Each structure stands twice: as C-alpha cells, then as structure tokens.
Image (cartoon, rainbow, N blue to C red):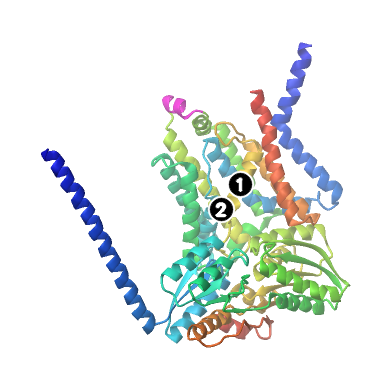
Amino acid sequence: MEKDKEQKIGVKTFIAKYGVIVGLVIIMVFFTVMKAKFLTVENMLNMLRQTSINGLLAIGMTFVVLTGGIDLSVGSIVGASGMFAALVARTEVGMPWYLALLVGLLVGLLLGAVNGVIISYLRVPAFIATLGMLSIARGITFMASDAKPVPGLSKGFLSIGGGSVGFFPIPILILIFVLIICYITLYKTRYGRYVFATGGNPTSARVSGINVKLITCSVYMISGLLSGLAGVILTSRVTSGLAQSGNGYEVDAIAAAVIGGNSLSGGRGRLWGTIIGFLIMGVMNNGLDMMAVSSYWQLVIKGIIIIGAVMLDSLNEIKE
Amino acid sequence: MKKRLIGALLVVSMAATMLIGCGAADKDAKKESNTEDTQTEGKVKIGMTLYSLKNEFTVRLANAAEAKAEELGIELVVYDGNYDPSTQISQVETMISDGCDGIILNPQDAEACAPCVDKAADAGIPVVGVNTRVKSDKLTSYVGSIDVTAGEMEMQKIVDLLDGKGNIVIIEGPMGQSAQIERREGIQNILDKYPDIKVLAEKTANWSRSEGMTVMENWLQAFDNIDAVVGENDEMALGAREAIKAAGKDIPAIGVDGITDALNAVEEDNLVASIFQDGAGQGSKAVEVLLDAINGETVEENYWIDFEEVNKDNVEEFKQRAQ
C-alpha cells in the first residue's frame, strides 16, 4: 500500500520533471512518421543551425530568469550588435573578421551592462529597464544605418554564420561551446551557486555575504554578451546588416526558457531544460514548415506548446 | 483677525493672477494663430505621415517628397507612424492643429487609418493617400501602384522562365496586409492560366530576409523538386537565395520593390529580376497632386505609377534612379 503511493508520486514527479523531454521525443517521432526527410542528418543540422540564434538568447535568458529577472531587450541588442559588426565587417573597411566579431560582442556586453547597472544599482525593475533598452537599442540601430541595409561584408565574416567545420555548421559549434562554458559556470563554480541563491532568496543571499547587486548586474551582462554573439551570427547568415534584425526575438527566448521549466519568479531552473525548450521550438518550426502547415496554425500550435509546458511544470509546484 | 485678513488678501491676489494669467495666454494664442495665418499666405505648409520610416522603401519615398517640396518651395513635415494606426491618427490631429494646408497619408492599415481622413476632411484640409490604401470616400486623391500587377508581372516572368511547367514555392508578406493580398491575387491570376505550374508550399516570412531564409531552408529539406521561388518582396527572395546558395543549389528567385540589395543581386545574377516599385515617383507625385488640390485645381481620383521590371539589361538605369 505504502509502496504504491510512493510509486504514484514517482510517476507524477517524473512527468513534471522530465515531461518536456518526453514531449520533444513525441514531437520528433510524429514528424519522422509524417515526413520521411525530417530525421536525416542534413535536416537535423539545418534545424540546429536555425535554432542556434534563439538558443544563445535562451541561454542568456536562463541566467537572467534564475535571478528572478527578465530581459526584454535581447532582440534589439541582436539588431544593434549585428549592425555595428556589419559596419566594421564591410569589405571596404578592410578589418579582419575577428575585429567585427569583437565589436558585436562589445556592443552587446555594453548594452547588457547598462541594463545591469540600471536594474541593480539604480533599482529600476528589470521589466521596465529592459523595456526601455528594447526601444533605445533599436533606435541606435536605425541611427547607425539610416534604415538602409549594410551589404558587402567580408568573406571571413560571412563564414561565422555560413561556414562549417567538416560538415558541422559553425553556428552549431558556437552554440555547443557556449553551452559547455555556461554549464560549468552555473553548476561547477561559486558564481553559479550565487546566481541560484540570488534568485531563490535575495535577502538570505545578502546576509550570507553574497554581493547580490553585482550578481544581478552580471547576469544582464551575460545576456547582453550572448545577444551580441547571436547578432553577429544572424548578420553573417543573412550576409548584411539589417536594421530590423532580431525584432521580437525576446518572445521566443523567453518562451524557450519557460518551456524548459525555468520559473519566472527566480531561483528554480535548469540549463538542460532551456536546451529542450529551444529544441522544441526549433523542431516545431522546421517540421511544420516541411509539412507546409499554414502560418496561422503554426502560431496557434506554438502558443499551445508554451502553455502546455508550463502546465506540466506547475504539476511539480503543486506537489511541492 | 490679522491672519485671516492676510489669508483673504492672498486668495484675492491668487485669483487675480490666475485671471490675468489666462488673459495673457489667450492673447498669446491669438498672436500665434495670426502669425501662422500670415505664414500660410506666404508659404504653403504640408504634413506627411508614413506607416513607418524604418524601411528603405518608405525612406526613399519620404526623401523624394522632401526634395519635391523644396523644389516647389513649400514646407513639409514628415512623421513616422511606427506601424501603428493610432499613432498616425494622433499625428494627423497634430498636423491639423499645427495649421497644415494639406496632408499626405501613407496608412499602416486601410480600415484603422480611415479616421485620419475623416478628421482632416472635417477641418477642410485635403488628404492625398500614397502607396498604401485607406478605405474612405473623403480622400482627395490617391497616388500609388497596383500591387496586383506586381504579382502578375513576377509570376509571368517565372512562368516564362520555366516554359509554363514546374514546381514553385511562394513566400508571402504579412498575412492580411494589402500588398500581400493584392500581390498574391496577381500571382494567382497567372497561376490560373498555367495549370502545369504547381505550388508546393507557401508561407509568410513577414517581409523579413532572415525569416525568408529559414522558411526556404526547411523547404529545401522537404522538397527536392523546387524549380523557382516567388517572393512577394525582395528581402524574402534574397533570404531564400542565401538558403539556396548555402545548400549548393541554384534555384531562381524573384522579388518585388527594387531595393538596393535586390538591384545589386539582379546585376550579379543572384535574382532573376525584381519588380521595381517607384517609391520616389510616388512620393514626388503625391506632393504635386496635393499642392494642386490646395490651390483649388481639380485633381483626379487616382494616379497610377507603373511597376517596372528590373533585369540584367536595364539594372544600371534603375541603380541611378534609386540614388
């Protein structure tokens, strides 16, 4: 009798904890059955390459969400950093590709740092501060480009988003590299523990000697830096700097983090969940396109998945 | 007693200042409108609201309008509607109270921007629509291009290229926008005539290059018999071409608008052609028509600026015009 009950809770916990993985598997099986060409190495690499941009944003978003914050400015930072990188990467400027990459990363880091300082030291709520940055960064992008595209980028720069090592597209390699670094940072360092502690209970974190302000500031810098990287990859992929780049990407990044089971109130979350989150979104987009499903239905299905995943997650909370 | 007296005095003096203040403000206002009147007698002032100033096409349109206004010696104030009909309505209200003699309207939405025309008509100010449609019978005149024609032109070009037989994919604009609906209608008009042209898939990429690229990548995985790509604008067609090139294939693509990147692409054989929409022509024509209307001359209901095909032979000419 007693054992039965334990078993039951076990199943429920399992669904709540690992339901998203089961979901991803079910979706993949469905597409494989419906479309023979879905589960091929070529298409999987294609899907991962498309997902890498949202993946980078979602990883940055995970750090922010873990501290109980939110970053609405990632899409605009993608636009700004991509545009400045493009301006440097033009063939006529004659700069090497890594300088353009560096410019993109620095613009992202700088805008993220502004977010962080405003939120942690000037005490503006994250929602408001990053909403402001969403507007400011987009405005700067338009000023830098006059709403015109910036084409004619150097070959080296174009290979960041378009090139591959062996048969592995470079954006996927970058994503994997970033994932490894972020995994180590979050789970194997003191800094990572501080991030979790800051989101779980800021007051007790402060009492136990953690510099909560510095930690809070730093997660927005991480999010900004990764947005900058995503901006460089996106610009390189579409082979020109476009002022509208990244518009609305914050929604997909937040959705991926949430689908993965990261609580928006902070402290509770997991990096692997985010990975499953952005994979689900990438697989859905790719598979539905291949089945030629109409755009209207794609929007509805995306919404259902976001809500469904959080419902799964709330099973976990009820139990606790 | 003394305190109360001081209090009463204070109240009186406050009331007095308020009254005097009001009077002064009234006088100022009158003075302002007087100077405005004299100004309008000397120089015509017009306002222009564009659904956005954040894409190359509308910027080109606005620049041409500004150049035309300068040439005709009239004052033009340009507003960015920021993809929002309610912003455009407030801007029209501002123009009316600002004493504009005429308004050029490039609406984001045909239905939601109708109040812009109503408000101006109530104030007795002529409104010339440009580039995108607004549903109103009070519009003084409309300057634009027929998007159905653009759809027909690009589809016909692809039909000719494929000799009337083959498989195509269509990348659409934001669903429900007038340009998307009308260009799609034009594409369909031609498709109806050629039953051997099969549409494998169609999806919106919201006029965006990166979305166009993603959609095309997925279609390339799903179908290996695509013969051509029809994009409802250049950005999406260019995105599709990036995906095609990355896959090591060479599937022809066509777009509409004739943006700078597309003209370069046509020159480099990267796009088959682009259907050039003469934004500059629309912008300067709108200013001319509006000035005629302000001067009391009769103007026609519609002025059509033709779409033109840009191909490798004539691309040089268009590059100069797009400057």
Furthest-right residue in this view: B196
Q: Quadrant of residue B307?
A: bottom right
Split into 4 quadrants, where in the image is the N terminus of chain B?
Answer: top left
A115 is within the stretch colored magenta: no
Residue in the image at 25% along x and 55% along y: B18
Residue in the image at 52% along x and 83% along y: B293
Question: Is residue B84 visible in the rendered structure shown here?
Answer: no
| Residue corresponding to mark 2 | A75
- Vertical relation: B255 (above or below) A26: below
Residue B321 in the figure: left or right of residue B9: right
- Per the rendering, the mark at residue A144 is none
Q: CA distance from mark 2 to mark 1?
A: 9 Å
- Vertical relation: A10 (above or below) A112: above
If you read the primary sequence from the N terminus, does the residue marked by circle 2 or circle 1 appear first? 2
Task: Say yes or no: labels 2 and 1 on the same chain.
Answer: yes
A206 is within the stretch colored magenta: yes
What's the magenta region?
Answer: A201-209
Residue in the image at 18% along x and 47% along y: B10
Give amino acid for label 2: Gly
Question: Is residue B264 visible in the rendered structure shown here?
Answer: yes
Residue A122 in the figure: left or right of residue B231: left
- Vertical relation: B158 (above or below) A239: below
| Residue corresponding to mark 1 | A253
Please say if the residues under marks 2 and 1 sit with CB atoms less than 8 Å apart.
yes
Q: Rate crowding at label 1 as few (under 14), some (14 to 19) or many (20 or more) other CA atoms within 10 Å.
A: many
- Whole-percent x, y for residue A120 in the image: 42, 39
- Whole-percent x, y for residue B132 in the image: 61, 72
Q: Quadrant of residue B266?
A: bottom right
Q: Magenta: predominant secondary structure element?
A: helix
In the image, B92 versus B138, the foreground residue is: B138
